[in-house]
Amino acid sequence: MSIEWEEARRLAYEAGRAAAGPAEPVALPDADGRTLAEPLRALTDLPAFPTSSIDGWAVRGPQPWRPVGRVLAGGVAAPLTEDGTCVEIATGAMVPTGAEALVRIEASTRDDDGRVRGEPRQGYVPEWRLPGEEASKDEELLPAGTAVDPAVIGVAATCGYESLNVYRRPRAGLLVFGDELLTAGTPGAGRVRDSLGPQVPGWLRRYGAIVEPGSVTGPVQDTLEAHLAAVRGALAGAELVCTTGGTMHGPVDHLHPTLAELGAEYIVNTVAVRPGYPMLLARVPGSDGRPRFLAGLPGNPQSAVIALITLVAPLLAGLQGRPAPALPTVEAAAKVRGRGDDTHLALARLDHDGRSATPVGHVGSAMLRGLSNAHGFIVVRPGTEAAPGDLVPFLPLPLVIGERP
């Protein structure tokens, strides 16, 4: 019996979350694209000391002020202890204890005897950053599960981190099934060009997996022995193996017997979604005690991509310790029919501001033209249809490598 689409995604995510590997420390420059395994906390107040935001003078008492020194960024300021004194100060420098105001250099003058006159800006907060203005020591800045990007790395560096504890990125491989497939040249004479072998690794990388050169194998010969050997070999070097084709029970569909031979446990076996039928996700025992996963994608290209974003995307989110992918809401720009008791995923393109989505053409299960012109899928739940103007869930495609799910 087919599993409801949203339930299938939940099961895939929970399976990945339960199997997420241990954290490892990674140097800041290498942490981009990883996921925080623990909260990022401020190691000190930010800023750690009062910091000037201008070039000018730090002054104490009434003017005119007698200069008694200078403080540059990176230096330690001596205290101002007497009224009527000041120090020249640079942007980013430590504001001396005892300073009462900062005067911008362009708002100041100097007398013949060198004394400084000027007016601090009125109606403004003091023109320096106070300790703890951005964060207090031990304050949680980002929770565990945050995807690390250059901005996160910058925050960590500001705090004084040299490395981050992050989840391991899972390794993934791909097996392409089907004797009818060509890996080069144009289709014809009963044979079709394989479009999944070249594209699936890119989708996997966008969802955070490592796909090494040489981790795509196929077409695998349509025999049980060849399937068993290929799956065993792929699982030996990857936490996740995707297969294309062979998810039904036809005369040359050997995936289910292969899984049975390997002692696999189905997490999801067929999903009530169109396009995308049939798909599966199985857990395979690993020799090291950690499970491996096999995602069976249909052979039709668009259906295979739908299976990947239905089952593989939430699985990979879980394996990396990230939150379960959430669906934003958009306005349907045109009618989208339902598919009875199944969820309908309708390829659509977002408008310029991302608030509405228009269905695209060329959306047959075996077609990829519509996919290449789309930003994702309008989700039409079972027993419903979408009318123009309706607010509907939208399942986005990851259009940029490392994009947060």
Image: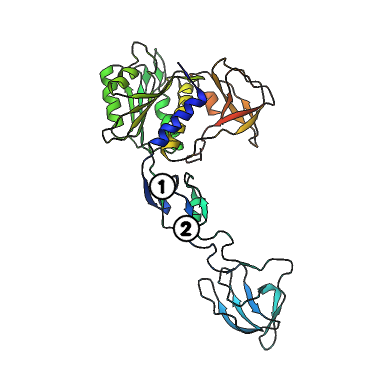
Q: Tell me if I can see residue 184 in this picture.
A: no
- In contact (CB < 8 Å): disc 2 and disc 1: no
Q: Identify the residue shown where x is 45% and y is 32%.
A: 13
Secondary structure at numbered mark 1: strand
Q: Position of residue 369 (x, y in %)?
A: 53, 24
N-terminal of the pair, mark 2 or mark 1, is 2
**Which quadrant of the figure contains the N terminus?**
top left
Tell us which disc is closer to us: 2 or 1. Answer: 1
- The label on residue 157 is 2
Q: Amino acid at mark 1?
A: Val
Crowding at dot 1, Cα within 10 Å, few <14 / some 14-19 / many 20+, comes out as many
Quadrant position of residue 318: top left
Q: Position of residue 45 (x, y in %)?
A: 53, 63
Q: Position of residue 121 (x, y in %)?
A: 72, 70
Read off the residue under disc 1.
Answer: 166
Task: Judge left or right: residue 147 versus residue 185.
Answer: right
